[in-house]
Image (cartoon, rainbow, N blue to C red):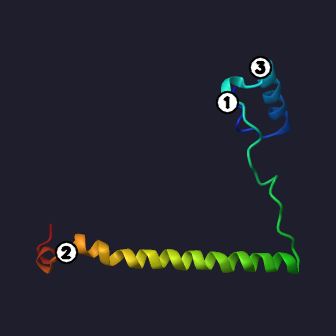
Amino acid sequence: MFCAGSYNEYHEISCIRACRSLGGTMHGICFQRPFSAETMTPIPDNVQGAILISIIDFILSFVIISGIGVVLAILPIVNRYWVIDDKDLKGGH
């Protein structure tokens, strides 16, 4: 029995019992309950939640813009190694 994907309480309890009966380790494959949406703290539906989402959005916009900048900075380097001549384009395959 692989206890990593506990989907409900009954399955989790049976995994814990099985792990304890085998010495508590279940040969190294008995894990704790996985991270799920049930354990996440929801963002409140009020002004504080809107401010929190705005801050997250602001920070992630810098991440996305920086990623685009990295791709644009790599393009000239790629262009040096993958030269396409006009003759090759007109010749076809």
Give the residue number, with chain letter if any, for mark 2.
Answer: 84
Nearer the observer, 41 or 59: 59
**What is the CA distance from the residue labelled 3 to the residue labelled 1?**
12 Å
Who's the residue at 83% across and 75% down the image? 49
**Image location of residue 60, percent across then percent down:** 63, 75
Q: Please say if 39 is above or below 56.
A: above
**Residue 61, quarter of the rendered image:** bottom right
> Judging from the image, what secondary structure is the residue with disc 2 in?
loop
* Upstream in sequence: badge 3 or badge 1: 3
- Front position in the image: 37 or 23: 23
Marks 3/2 in contact by CB < 8 Å: the verdict is no
Numbered tag placed on residue 23 in the rendering? 3
Q: Could you tell me the amino acid type at mark 3?
A: Gly
Q: Hey, what amino acid is under mark 1?
A: Ile
Local SS, label 1: loop
Instruction: Residue 65 in the image: state x and y as whole percent.
Output: 54, 80
Among the 4 quarters of the image, the one containing residue 30: top right
Which residue has dot 1 on it?
A: 29
Label 2 packing within 10 angstroms: few (<14), some (14-19), many (20+): few
The N terminus, quarter of image:
top right
